[in-house]
C-alpha cells in the first residue's frame, strides 16, 4: 500500500480522510508558547512534528499502549514516511487541537492521519500523514508482526 497523498489545498473538503467526524479522531490540545515560534511569533514548522508525535504517543497511551513499555519489549516504531501540508499559521498564544487517527494498518506498517486546527475558530492549519513501521531494537530489522497486545489495541482503535 502506498502512502496517501495530500490533496491540493482547494480540494481539502473532498478528501474523505479529512471529513471524518470528531469521534473518530484522538484529540490532543496544545497552547502555542514562545519557544514554539520563530522571531515573528509564528509557530516554527518543526513544532508541528513534535506535537504530532506527542499526540500519537498520548493516543497510544489512551488505548493501553505505553510507548516506554513498547521500547522495553524491544519494539521501536520509527517514522519511515511523512507528508505535511501547512495551510494557515498558528501564532503565539493561540490554542490548537491536534487530531490524529489510524488510517490503515498493514502488517507492521501503520499509517496515521493528522489535522491541526486553531481551537477557537476551528480553522484548519496543518494536515499530515505519517507512516510508522515496527522495528526490532536488537537487530534493527523490521518485525514480522507486532506484539499481540499492541496489535489488538491498535486494531480496536482503528475500527472505532
Image: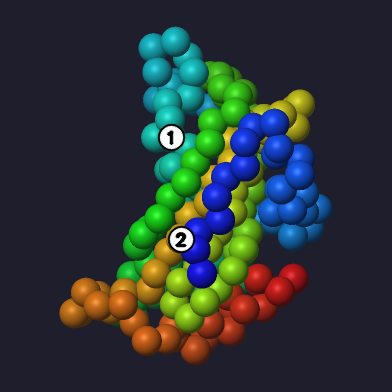
In the picture, the quarter occupied by the C terminus is bottom right
Circle 1 sits in a helix, a strand or a loop, which is it? helix
Q: Is residue 93 visible?
A: yes
Residue 129's spot in the image, x, y percent? Answer: 53, 51
Q: Along the line of sight, which residue is nearer the eye, 159 or 8?
A: 8
The image quadrant that residue 91 belongs to is top right
Q: Along the line of sight, which residue is nearer the eye, 81 or 22?
A: 81
Give the residue drawn at x 36%, y 59%.
Answer: 80
Question: Which residue in the protein does label 1 denote?
Answer: 47
Circle 2 sits in a helix, a strand or a loop, which is it? strand
Q: Using a 10 Å C-alpha cutoff, classify the residue at mark 1 as few (fewer than 14 neighbours), some (14 to 19) or many (20 or more).
A: few
Q: Is residue 57 visible?
A: no
Residue 32's spot in the image, x, y percent? Answer: 53, 27
Q: Along the line of sight, which residue is nearer the eye, 65 or 5?
A: 5
Q: Select label 2 or label 1 by which is in front.
A: 2
Give the residue drawn at x 39%, y 12%.
Answer: 39
Give the residue drawn at x 75%, y 32%.
Answer: 122
Relative to 159, 77 lies left or right: left
Residue 30's spot in the image, x, y percent? Answer: 58, 37
Q: Along the line of sight, which residue is nearer the eye, 52 or 58?
A: 52
Residue 136 marker? none
- CA distance separating discs 2 and 1: 18 Å
Residue 126's spot in the image, x, y percent? Answer: 58, 36
Vertically, is 35 above or below 17? above
Count of marks, rendered view: 2
Vertically, is 23 above or below 98? below
Residue 131 marker? 2
Relative to 55, 34 lies left or right: left
**Which of the marked residues, 2 or 1, is nearer the chain's N terminus?**
1
Amino acid at each position: 500500500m502506498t502512502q496517501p497523498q495530500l490533496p491540493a489545498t482547494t480540494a481539502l473538503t473532498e478528501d474523505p480522510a479529512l471529513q471524518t467526524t470528531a469521534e473518530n479522531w484522538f484529540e490532543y490540545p496544545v497552547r502555542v508558547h514562545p519557544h514554539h515560534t520563530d522571531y515573528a511569533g509564528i509557530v516554527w514548522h518543526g513544532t508541528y512534528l513534535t506535537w504530532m508525535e506527542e499526540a500519537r504517543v498520548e493516543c497510544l497511551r489512551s488505548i493501553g499502549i505505553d510507548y516506554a513499555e513498547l521500547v522495553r519489549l524491544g519494539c521501536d516504531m520509527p517514522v519511515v514516511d511523512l507528508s505535511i501540508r501547512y495551510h494557515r499559521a498558528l501564532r503565539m498564544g493561540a490554542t490548537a487541537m491536534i487530531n490524529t487517527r489510524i488510517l490503515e494498518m498493514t502488517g507492521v506498517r501503520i499509517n496515521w492521519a493528522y489535522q491541526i486546527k486553531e481551537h477557537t475558530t476551528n480553522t484548519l492549519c496543518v494536515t499530515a500523514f505519517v507512516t510508522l513501521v515496527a522495528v526490532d531494537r536488537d537487530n534493527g530489522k523490521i518485525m514480522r508482526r507486532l506484539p499481540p497486545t499492541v496489535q489488538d489495541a491498535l486494531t480496536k482503535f482503528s475500527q472505532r
